[in-house]
Image (cartoon, rainbow, N blue to C red):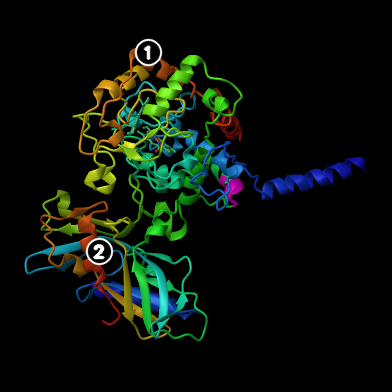
């Protein structure tokens, strides 16, 4: 009898677990602005995030099942591809841009270096279809997922529908990416008055506020605008930047300002990965700037930093490393999901 | 053969026409000729030059019915992808209440800007339908692909993917037509308009939002009419 008493509530709970979606609570870090994503309209659910994570790590999204999103966006390097200046895709084909670090995307409105993508949902379409990245078609991805053993079940859990659509596939990937929040660096803890900068870091922070934060604005360390920071155009790539999308001459050579969070790990730097070290970046800002019609006004006059200043500035930039983010197991390869599928 | 296919197309559409609600039946035409389902048919655009239509796909959205210049019914979630390889898609069934009569029909050729920035959508808007640009977000409003002797391209192919939702390249266009409500309306869409004054030799590929896409959309939208 006692057993029965237990079984009933347990099975009710189990039933509920299958029908109700577990809400994934997205917390806005203290002192941060409202995200661009409206989570009231479209709340995250644990099931969708988990499905999205599986898809993010699954090479089934590429034509020959060799490349996953994670091939170019590795968690330990803040979701960028280290050691490659330009991204490496299918059959080792080389792209035209450096893969950006992925974090705090819920605050972004436009994606890609030139803002060609207007919503996080549709972001994944670009790499999936790019012939030098995954070289696949979303139509075909959906067919492959539908045929698989694993996915109809995961889609059923996430969307209450085992019929897989492009919309649901994309939304799941987007939900996973929205959970990638980095807000636990030393810098953050100093701002919350839980720890203190060293004297050197403090000097670096002051230099940063004076010279850099108009574009790399706190707390996201990007103002999310398109700016030209005076990089001379690479003559082989001839990347025109934002003008490619808007066809407006004022946008020539402008690129989306990247975040500097986890910058220690997200080398190489810039849209074409031209710099390997932070030192190279600072040298660019002090002596490498090429003036142009569209250069941002903050950089018309050179930035002056002594070599000591540069050391201090780098010390500050290293306080933006967030180990909790880099080693967050919720972002890592979902071994449990794939292992279970292999057993079935 | 063409005529036969056309007849089958029409009868197909009429047979299933008994359900409730108003129906809009779109006829794709080239000058005065019906474009039959499936595509692959060839049309003269001058004494010496021809155009073969292989792909024809476009969105009709935001359908509204009007009477005396007032909107009397508006379709919600109003997006329809019409595709020459799917004849049934040319019959748009509206869930109108009984007892209304309309004298004007309003719709948009293409997808409006708000929808274009609303993320991944479903149904006819699902990105698997082949009407979404992947490397730069946005819907293709109108897609026409085929061949012409005038195109000095590989296989003499031309491709017009017209779209764009941001000014100055916003390409969706509103259409208002006077109609006679016979439990719905028939709308003719003359694709030949696109080729008026177009130098296919020079302009045979549009694959992204641009000035030319806007100009062609302006020309094309004049191809809608409600009488034969």
Callout 2 crowding tier (Cα within 10 Å): few <14, some 14–19, many ≥20:
many
The tag on residue A191 is none
- Real-space CA distance between mark 2 and mark 1, rounded to the nearest whole angstrom: 60 Å
Classify the position of the N terminus of chain B by image quarter. Answer: bottom left
Q: Which residue is mark 1?
A: A308
Say left or right for A126 vs A11. left
Name the residue at 52% across, 43% down. Answer: A175
How far from the left and from the top, in percent, is residue B43?
17, 68
Report helix, strand or loop for mark 1: helix
Q: Quadrant of residue A257?
A: top left
Q: Nearer the viewer, residue A31 or A263?
A: A31
How far from the left and from the top, in percent, is residue B112?
37, 61
Same chain for labels 2 and 1? Say yes or no: no
* Chain letter of the residue carrying label 1: A
Callout 1 crowding tier (Cα within 10 Å): few <14, some 14–19, many ≥20:
few
Q: Which residue is mark 2?
A: B217
Name the residue at 49% across, 23% down. Answer: A321
Report helix, strand or loop for mark 2: helix
Of marks 2 and 1, the one in the foreground: 1
Say left or right for A259 vs A52. left
């Amino acid at each position: 009898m006692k057993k029965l008493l237990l079984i009933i509530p347990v099975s009710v709970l189990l039933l509920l677990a299958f029908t109700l979606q577990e809400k994934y609570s997205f917390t806005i870090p203290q002192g941060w602005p409202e995200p661009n994503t409206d989570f009231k309209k479209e709340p995250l659910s644990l099931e969708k995030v988990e499905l999205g994570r599986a898809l993010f790590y699954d090479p089934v999204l590429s034509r020959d099942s060799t490349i996953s999103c994670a091939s170019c966006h590795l968690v330990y390097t803040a979701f960028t591809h280290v050691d490659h200046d330009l991204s490496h895709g299918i059959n080792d084909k080389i792209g035209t841009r450096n893969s950006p670090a992925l974090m705090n995307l819920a605050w972004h409105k436009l994606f890609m270096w030139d803002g060609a993508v207007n919503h996080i949902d549709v972001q994944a379409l670009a790499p999936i279809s790019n012939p030098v990245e995954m070289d696949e078609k979303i139509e075909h991805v959906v067919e492959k997922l539908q045929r698989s053993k694993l996915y109809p079940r995961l889609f059923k859990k996430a969307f209450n529908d085992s019929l897989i659509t492009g919309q649901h596939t994309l939304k799941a990937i987007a939900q996973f990416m929205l959970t990638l929040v980095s807000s636990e660096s030393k810098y953050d803890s100093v701002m919350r008055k839980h720890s203190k900068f060293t004297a050197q870091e403090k000097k670096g922070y002051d230099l940063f506020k004076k010279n850099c934060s108009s574009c790399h604005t706190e707390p996201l360390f990007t103002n999310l605008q398109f700016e030209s920071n005076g990089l001379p155009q690479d003559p082989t790539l001839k990347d025109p930047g934002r003008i490619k999308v808007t066809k407006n001459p004022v946008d020539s050579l402008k690129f989306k300002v990247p975040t500097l969070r986890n910058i220690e790990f997200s080398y190489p730097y810039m849209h074409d990965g031209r710099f390997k070290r932070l030192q190279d970046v600072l040298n660019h800002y002090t002596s490498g700037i090429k003036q142009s019609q569209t250069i941002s006004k903050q950089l018309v006059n050179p930035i002056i930093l002594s070599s000591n200043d540069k050391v201090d500035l780098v010390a500050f930039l290293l306080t933006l490393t967030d180990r909790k983010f880099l080693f967050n197991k919720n972002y890592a390869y979902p071994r449990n999901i794939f292992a279970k599928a292999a057993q079935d | 053969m063409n005529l036969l296919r056309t007849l089958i197309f029409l009868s197909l559409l009429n047979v299933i026409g008994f359900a409730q609600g108003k129906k809009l039946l779109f006829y794709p035409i080239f000058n005065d000729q019906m474009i039959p389902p499936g595509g692959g048919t060839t049309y003269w655009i001058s004494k010496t030059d021809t155009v073969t239509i292989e792909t024809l796909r476009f969105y009709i959205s935001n359908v509204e019915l009007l009477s005396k210049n007032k909107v009397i019914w508006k379709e919600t979630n109003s997006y329809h992808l019409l595709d020459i390889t799917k004849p049934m898609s040319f019959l748009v069934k509206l869930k109108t209440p009984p007892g209304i009569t309309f004298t004007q029909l309003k719709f948009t050729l293409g997808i409006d800007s708000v929808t274009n920035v609303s993320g991944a959508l479903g149904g006819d808007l699902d990105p698997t339908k082949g009407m979404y640009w992947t490397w730069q977000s946005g819907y293709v409003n109108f897609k026409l692909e085929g061949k012409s002797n005038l195109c000095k391209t590989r296989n003499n192919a031309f491709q017009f993917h017209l779209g764009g939702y941001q000014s100055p390249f916003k390409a969706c266009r509103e259409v208002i037509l006077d109609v006679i409500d016979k439990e719905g309306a028939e709308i003719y869409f003359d694709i030949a308009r696109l080729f008026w004054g177009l130098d296919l030799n020079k302009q045979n590929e549009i694959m992204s939002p641009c000035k030319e896409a806007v100009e062609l959309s302006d020309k094309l939208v004049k191809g809608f009419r409600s009488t034969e």
